[in-house]
Image: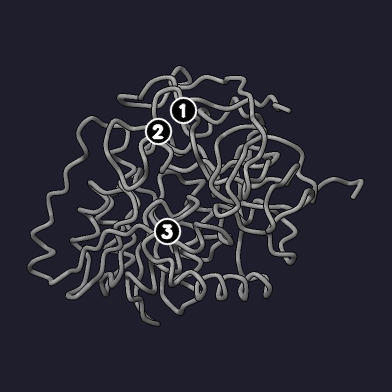
């Protein structure tokens, strides 16, 4: 028997800033489950800059979403029906799935929710892919060492805030870069790290020089452009730049230029592009460390949660406008762990 569901489809490719007109909600019919498939009622959807890349006209590391196809992202949900030996109805799962209220997902794309997790949104932040990205990026890509000075762009965002926390827990001195005074204060108060607001009167380079008198050993780049320029000026000889994102260029037809790349030569700086899915063999160590810190109450989770599948485009716009602190999430249905009846 076919089941009716609502999915968010790509209607057109954004040329610059994402608009609600680039998407449409569509009723779809879900046929019988095939062996190994699971029917999931979606609870939360992760809103990440990567979605902008999936729907872009540019070729990326992820399969380009076709016009008329459902938009994919990471999600958390509850199993409604199952043709899988791994999951049964009622199980809470997470993984890559279509933006929708009901979705069919191969069991190979899903993971169980650890019993210790009582706050599901945390699995989309420091206990999820952002935390794993932070740990693997710092340890396996940035080769961070205790005592290093680590500079982090978008330090109040989902990935950036995880990087700040992991770097501190690994014994580093951390300085963050953000775009508002509210975010600067949040990073200083909640993450206990020094932080600068690049929109304040003094130039970013002047502010960073004051906070990093001994230079920067590792720079975590979520931005590209002028932020990478400023970081290269401050990096020490043999420094490592972890290139995780270029959010300053996703909404541009032409990316913001970086003028100081010559310093990578004169200072022997390593610039390494980083996609976490290429480091699957290192996930276990990352998850073990993150779960250990979480059990000790050492990880801070901050979410900006908006409700309704129709608000996925607005959530994406919020991320690119910098209107969020921490992880931006769309809640599609009731969270069973927050249900007072349970």
Q: Element type at marker 2?
A: loop
Task: Name the residue that disc number 3 marks.
Answer: 195
According to the image, label 1 marks what residue? 69
Q: Position of residue 204 (x, y in %)?
A: 28, 52
Point 62% across, 52% down: residue: 94
Q: Position of residue 216 (x, y in %)?
A: 28, 69
Residue at 84%, 45% in the rendered image: 339
Q: Is residue 272 above or below residue 320?
A: below
Badge 3: how crowded within 10 Å, few (<14), some, or many (20+)? Answer: many
95 with respect to 102 (left or right) = left
The answer to whether residue 203 of the structure is visible from this angle is: no
Q: Point out which mark residue 65 bears.
A: 2
Quadrant for the N terminus in the image: top right
Q: Residue at x 60, y 66 (%)?
A: 299
Q: Position of residue 231 (x, y in %)?
A: 24, 59
Determine whether the residue tagged by mark 1 lies in a helix, strand or loop: loop
Instruction: Estimate the spatial distance between the alpha carbons at disc 1 and disc 3, rounded to whole Å.
Output: 41 Å
The image quarter containing residue 125 is bottom right
Q: Are marks 2 and 3 in contact (CB under 8 Å)?
A: no
Q: Are marks 1 and 2 in contact (CB under 8 Å)?
A: yes
Label 2 vs label 3: CA separation? 37 Å
């Amino acid at each position: 028997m076919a089941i009716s569901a609502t999915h968010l489809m790509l209607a057109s490719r954004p040329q610059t800033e994402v608009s609600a007109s680039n998407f449409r909600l569509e009723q779809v019919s879900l046929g019988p489950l095939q062996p190994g498939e699971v029917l999931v009622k979606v609870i939360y959807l992760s809103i990440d800059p990567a979605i902008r890349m999936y729907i872009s006209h540019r070729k990326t590391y992820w399969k380009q979403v076709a016009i008329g196809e459902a938009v994919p992202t990471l999600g958390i949900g509850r199993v409604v029906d199952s043709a899988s030996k791994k999951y049964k109805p009622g199980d809470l799962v997470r993984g890559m799935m279509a933006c929708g209220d009901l979705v069919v997902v191969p069991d190979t794309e899903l993971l169980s929710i650890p019993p210790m997790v009582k706050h599901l949104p945390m699995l989309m932040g420091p206990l999820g892919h952002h935390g794993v990205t932070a740990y693997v990026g710092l340890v396996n890509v940035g080769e961070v060492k205790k005592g290093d000075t680590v500079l982090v762009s978008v330090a109040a965002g989902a990935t950036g805030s995880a990087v700040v926390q992991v770097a501190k827990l690994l014994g580093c001195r951390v300085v963050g870069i953000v775009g508002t005074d509210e975010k600067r204060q949040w990073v200083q108060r909640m993450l206990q790290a020094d932080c600068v607001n690049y929109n304040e009167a003094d130039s970013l380079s002047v502010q960073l020089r004051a906070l990093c008198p001994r230079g920067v050993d590792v720079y975590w780049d979520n931005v590209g452009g002028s932020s990478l320029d400023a970081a290269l000026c401050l990096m020490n000889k043999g420094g490592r730049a972890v290139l995780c994102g270029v959010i300053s260029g996703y909404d541009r037809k032409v990316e913001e230029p970086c003028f100081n790349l010559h310093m990578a030569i004169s200072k022997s700086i390593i610039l390494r592009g980083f996609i976490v899915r290429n480091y699957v063999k290192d996930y276990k160590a990352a998850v073990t460390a993150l779960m250990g810190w979480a059990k000790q109450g050492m990880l801070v989770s901050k979410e900006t949660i908006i409700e309704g599948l129709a608000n996925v485009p607005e959530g994406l716009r919020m991320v690119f406008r910098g209107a969020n602190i921490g992880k931006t999430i769309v809640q599609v249905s009731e969270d069973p762990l927050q249900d007072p009846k349970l």
